[in-house]
Image (cartoon, rainbow, N blue to C red):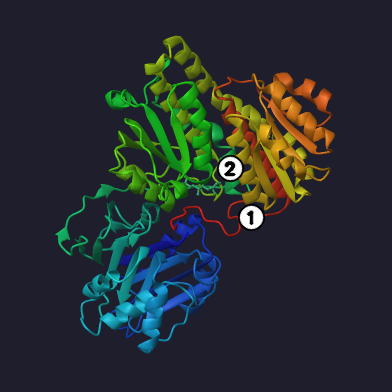
Amino acid sequence: MCGIIGIAGRADITAPLMEGLARLEYRGYDSAGLAVVGSEDAEPKRRRCVGQVKALAQNLRTQGLSGEVGIAHTRWATHGTPSEENAHPLVSGTIALVHNGIIENFRPLRSELEAAGYRFESNTDSEVIVHLIHHQLVATEDLAEAVRAVVKRLQGQFALAVISSSDPDCIVAVRSGSPLVLGCGDGQNSVASDASALAGLARQAVFLEEGDLATIAADRIAIEDRNAAPVTRSPVPLKSGQEVRLGQYEYHLQREIFAHPDSIRAVLADRLQGDRVSAFDDFAGLLDRVEGISIAACGSSYLAAEVARHWFEELAGLPCQAEIASEYRYRAQVIQPNTLFLTLSQSGETADTLAAFKKAQGQGYLTTLSMCNAPLSSLPRLSDIEFMLNAGPEISVASTKVVSASLVALLLLAMTLARRNGLTSSREAELVGALRALPEQVQQVLQRDADFEQQAVAIASQNHALFIGRRAFYPIALEGALKLKELSYIHAEGHAAGELKHGPLALVDENMPVIALAPADDLISKLESNLQEIKARGGRLYVITDQSLASRLQAELECAVIPLPDTHAVTAPILYLVSVQLLACHVGLHRNTNLDQPRNLAKSVTVE
Ligand code: M6R
């Protein structure tokens, strides 16, 4: 998604701006640009290009650019194709602007501006803002005042950073629905759409609140709240970013899949004490009152929540509703007393999850808890209880190691809540033992890499695939289908195995790979019947199963079988999660897709 970085300094800031842009690349984008002003400039100087930040860097090397104050942007197209005209910064006379978010009322504003004589060079919703600011500066000479007046006319969500060659010492930035964070440095201050872009630029970060407007100069930062009253926002220390190296891997996705064991170890570290879960001890009194759980999340985080629903219900005996955040935010909820509202998000910035959270606030939930992997991101800062997943940076757009960390975190919570409903210490010790064994078992799954690669070859030649599973393995089947879509562009669907005969079975023929998740549990004979139905219709079966069942299933179904290590029934979905991700990764490799940046997608989905 779009990323913003802006720096106000005393010397040329082009190089640090480009470094900031490079740190925003992980969000996914299709074009990039920057604009700078210096004290001698009549207008902002700008460079933009379609494609990668390195193309912009090459442009700067050949054509040069310098200035003491500047803004830069990575754009993920919403309104208007990826093109140089649509790339930010957008300029109107002396003003340059970068924008994250969406302006919903841009059409009437555009008509009004065109009638006033403004000529539009882009198809973006954003361009109205820069012309409105330019127009407003006829009424006032103060840039911050003009931006404040224009913001009042905008509908939608946005984060803006604006510079002007008439006021070349500062950047004016506004947060309204899209996050912005300020960086305080020595002799230079900065602004960015997320704290990771500020690494190396600042020692402290100041998170803007909704409606805040900041004026950022090299030696001072002034913040006004939504009522234009001066405010102070507390700074927090910025840790230096962890450098991520590809090492032996071609893609971050592969590195991240092979980091599953480490991410599980990291989320467990300091959260177990002997045979018991200690992760939530600080909130024991509050959590003792929980009578139900409502989870809002998107994509793979939502699917992890769907797996956890089974744990909350089966282990803790508590009703649990997992919901896609973009649906939650527009639906009427019936909230039972003492319900815990939980958000789950790798980035902590997903717009729909944030909106669901904001809707939930003040609705009578017992408390809010967020599980998140990005330190200093919005969701944990806003929630009553934050639980960091500690899985380390995840660069690939497709989420992998953070999903296993999320599942472990959710299981820790389910075990904590289960105590009140009769989880004995011996059963807790058994589950803690299963959790401690997980990293090694996941490692064994990863050691079967060659088996996954072998099966991926045949799947890669097809255009469709089905994943099936039952109970907690049904959301894992959905995750398999999601990952296959993202990584290979094969059309894939996930189904509850028992639902096949109610419709999807019509799709099955000799060209339809069906990947079945077949753990050795009490439903295996039911699942085997489903597999026989597929076999009878010529479907190509790929069965992922526990070691103990592998040879029998292979003999009976005469199909490809990938065995996984036998594990505890409660933690088994985590092993199957890793297996479907590894399979999808190999299919993508065979189809030669960009595994780290699937087309049309972005890492941090900060627009609705
Ligand atoms: O950062 P979040 O966990 O909130 O992101 C949610 C989804 O956007 C994310 O899981 C997405 O579905 C991934 N591309 C899945 O691989």
> Against 56, is 44 above or below?
below
Q: Residues within 10 Å of mark 1 (few under 14, many from 20)?
A: some
Residue 248 visible? The answer is no
Which percent across, then down, holds residue 566?
65, 20
Outermost residue toward the bottom in this view: 117
Reading the image, the residue beneath label 2 is 255
> Against 568, is 388 above or below?
below
Amino acid at dot 2? Arg
Which percent across, then down, holds residue 395?
51, 49
- 67 on left or right of 511: left
Q: Residues within 10 Å of mark 2 (few under 14, many from 20)?
A: many
Which percent across, then down, holds residue 488?
68, 51
- 179 on left or right of 604: left
Amino acid at dot 1? Asn
The quarter of the picture where the C terminus appears is bottom left
Instruction: Give the label on residue 594, or none.
Output: 1
- 400 on left or right of 429: right
